[in-house]
Amino acid sequence: MYAILELAGTQYKVAPKQVIEVNQKIGELKLSVTFDRVLLFCDGKKVEIGQPYVEGVTVEAEVLAQTKAKKVIIFKYLRRKDSHKKTGHRQDQTRLLIKKINN
């Protein structure tokens, strides 16, 4: 059994007892969250494809950790102009444990 769900503008293929990392802060630590934006659901025999989402299918997950990703350095440089700019960014990340897929 697996499902493809949409989180933070990205599609993830998930199955029960799987751990995924999402590039967004979702929920609170150690709490359960439910997602209803399921694009595809497969139970082994039958495949349901949503238009755009599958009705009545939800995914339950538990928030394991909320961290930040490694820093991404943005360096802008203009040659012969004595001009440069250095900035950095750390993206928020959430680690989720998929508990079950309800249909």
Image (spheres, rainbow, N blue to C red):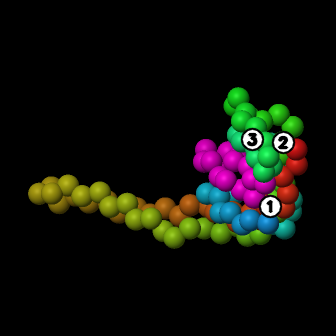
Kind of residue sitting beneath label 2: Val
Identify residue for label 2. 57
Label 1: state its secondary structure: loop
| 45 on left or right of 9 | right
C-alpha distance separating marks 2 and 3: 12 Å
Kind of residue sitting beneath label 3: Val
Quick one: label 2 or label 3, which is nearer the N terminus?
3
C-alpha distance separating marks 1 and 2: 14 Å
**Contact between labelled residues 3 and 2, with CB atoms less than 8 Å apart:** no
Quick one: label 1 or label 3, which is nearer the N terminus?
1
Identify residue for label 1. 16
Identify residue for label 3. 47
For the record, the magenta segment spans 1-16
Examine the structure image and report whether residue 13 is included in the region drawn in magenta: yes
Crowding near the residue tagged with mark 2, few <14, some 14–19, many ≥20 C-alpha atoms within 10 Å: some
In percent of width and height, residue 74 lies at: 37, 60
* Rendered image quadrant of residue 14: bottom right
